[in-house]
Amino acid sequence: MDPYTLSKAFLELYYTTFDTNRAGLANLYQETSMLTFEGQKIEGSQNIVNKLTSLPFQQCKHSITTVDCQPSGPVDSMLIFVGGNLQLAGEQHALKFI
């Protein structure tokens, strides 16, 4: 499978899970995974999921507008840059994310 198709499949899984069951994201992270959220660096699968599940909203919907991917690092690794909009329930305007 080419990198772009694989990236799109991963992003579909990731953001569908984020929007419906954030706790289910744990299997998509490793203990060496890192997340930077508003300047805070968070490392490890459980710490990342704890952060994501503690966000002050229950329902949201991501819509992806930009995907750039390239092979990176060790064999079978990819770097994916994604941008889009995050619509929170009850909010009129979407938030931008990358």
Image (spheres, grey):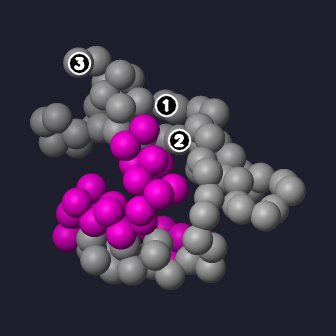
Q: Residues within 10 Å of mark 2 (few under 14, many from 20)?
A: some
Q: Residue 72, image x and y in percent? A: 28, 38
Calculate the distance from the C-alpha at mark 1 to the C-alpha at mark 2: 7 Å
Tag 3 secondary structure: loop
Tag 1 secondary structure: strand
Q: Which mark is residue 1?
A: 3
Q: Which mark is residue 82?
A: 2
Q: At x 77% / y 52%, what residue is drawn?
A: 94
Above or below, comparing residue 84 to residue 96 in the picture: above
Q: At x 60% / y 64%, what residue is drawn?
A: 59
Q: Is-magenta flag for residue 32? A: yes
- Judged left or right of residue 87, residue 31 is left
Q: Residue 69, image x and y in percent? A: 41, 31
Tag 2 secondary structure: strand
Calculate the distance from the C-alpha at mark 1 to the C-alpha at mark 3: 16 Å
Q: Which residues are magenta?
A: 12-40
Do the CB atoms of the residues marked 1 and 2 lie less than 8 Å apart? yes
* Visible residue check, residue 97: no
Mark closer to the chain start, 1 or 3: 3
Calculate the distance from the C-alpha at mark 3 to the C-alpha at mark 2: 19 Å
Q: Nearer the viewer, residue 70 or 5?
A: 5
Name which quarter of the figure residue 88 lies in.
Answer: bottom right
Q: Nearer the viewer, residue 28 or 67?
A: 28
Residue type at numbered disc 1: Asp
